[in-house]
Image: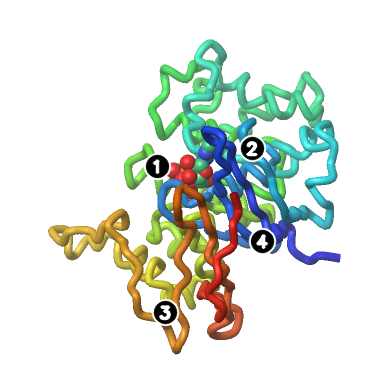
Amino acid sequence: MDQHILHVKNLSVSFNKNKNKMTAVSDVSLQIDKGQTVALIGESGSGKSITSLSVLQLLPPNGQLEKGSITFKGKDLLKQSEKEMRRIRGNEISMIFQDAIASLNPGMKVGVQITEGLKYHKLVPKSDLKAEALQLLEQVGFKNPAHIYEQYPVQLSGGMKQRILIAMAISCKPQLIIADEPTTSLDVTIQRQVLDLIDNYKSDLDASVLLITHDFGVVAEYADWVYVMLGGHIVESADVYTIFKNPVHPYTKALIESIPNPEKSQERLKSIQDFTFEKVGYKGRTFAPETYTLESKSFNAPSSLVEVEPLHYVRFYDDERKVVSIG
Ligand SMILES: Nc1ncnc2c1ncn2[C@@H]1O[C@H](COP(=O)(O)OP(=O)(O)OP(=O)(O)O)[C@@H](O)[C@H]1O
């Protein structure tokens, strides 16, 4: 049996856009073990969200899972019925979406919103729902849970709303939390509080976290393992110490260089958008370019992840440099 709690193997996802097929995620494999926080890091549009939405089978209607398998606790998620996926979502795997604050119902007290998952999955008798919500509010750091229970979202700050979302995400005690940029709209202190809450939950329950971010500072602090994504591909992966000690792919290096350094606050951050591939290779190999367009058709460079040192993988060109049509 697969010992990983989540194992994504060779996942490819495409979109139909203006009658063209565009590959958003290409041959992505990743794994998460029990008790681990695994970071998926990359710039906007690199395919992080689409990878995680595939796990929960929540792809947008024009998205297609082209190939791959997704195993959760030994179960092939792609073979589950929609009914079973509804049971898994929120109950066993919980996702904190990117702009989830907007998804809070403005007309419903936040205390009641926290109980929705418990009610749906019938995990707690109706009479205990409020007590459970109060306990969850306390768990996410509210000193006055009874007061907060009665509030509507508009009465709470961004950081408080984010804590409500975490209370919702952990209410059913999922074994895996997928947190998609859970803190982008929050100031730095609140960001840390929110990430600490997720981290504490993980440690207390020996759960696992897939943390989606574009911030290597966050990776350094919270992740055990890192996958770097660029143009729909994983371009480098290793444990967090190795990634920082010996980043190999130029994009990984650029991301690490972009971590804000408080001691050099005047220094201009390296712009990842301006990032261009170094034409240099690494020990005789050339870094693989990502998807590119030729005569208005998209192509993928055939490339492979090479183990440059034990359990440290980097994406290079294959030796034969032919291109493969995906259109
Ligand atoms: N509904 C859609 N239709 C067409 N293309 C889409 C759709 N959703 C996402 N894409 C494309 O898929 C690619 C990957 O998007 P994805 O949202 O996974 O990126 P991301 O790395 O999570 O970025 P961000 O941090 O901005 O969310 C992008 O090129 C995006 O434009």
- Disc on the earlier residue, 3 or 1: 1
Image quadrant assignment for residue 20 = top right
Question: Whole-percent x and y of residue 128?
Answer: 75, 24
User: Element type at marker 4?
Assistant: strand
Q: Is mark 2 within 8 Å of ligand 1?
A: no
Q: Looking at the image, do the residues carrying marks 3 and 1 touch, with CB atoms under 8 Å apart?
A: no
- Image coords of residue 217 (percent x, y): 38, 60
Q: Read off the residue under disc 3.
A: 245
Mark 4 and mark 1: Cα distance apart in space: 23 Å
- In the image, what residue occupies the spot 47% across and 83% down? 285
Give yes or no for contact between labels 2 and 4 (Cβ–Cβ under 8 Å).
no
Q: How would you rate the neighbour count of disc 3 (Cα within 10 Å): few for under 14, some for 14-19, many for 20 or more?
A: few
Q: Which mark is residue 32?
A: 4
What is the spatial separation of the Cα atoms under label 3 and label 4, in whole angstroms?
22 Å
Q: Which residue is mark 2?
A: 59
- Secondary element at image label 2: loop
Estimate how packed mark 1 is, as few (under 14), some (14 to 19) or many (20 or more) residues with alpha carbons within 10 Å: some
User: Quick one: which residue is furthest to the top in this view?
Assistant: 107
Cα distance in 3D space between marks 1 and 2 = 22 Å
Q: Which residue is mark 1?
A: 184
Question: Which mark's residue is nearer the viewer, 2 or 4?
Answer: 2
Residue type at mark 1 is Thr
Image quadrant in which you'd find residue 105: top right
Closest to the observer, 292 or 9: 292
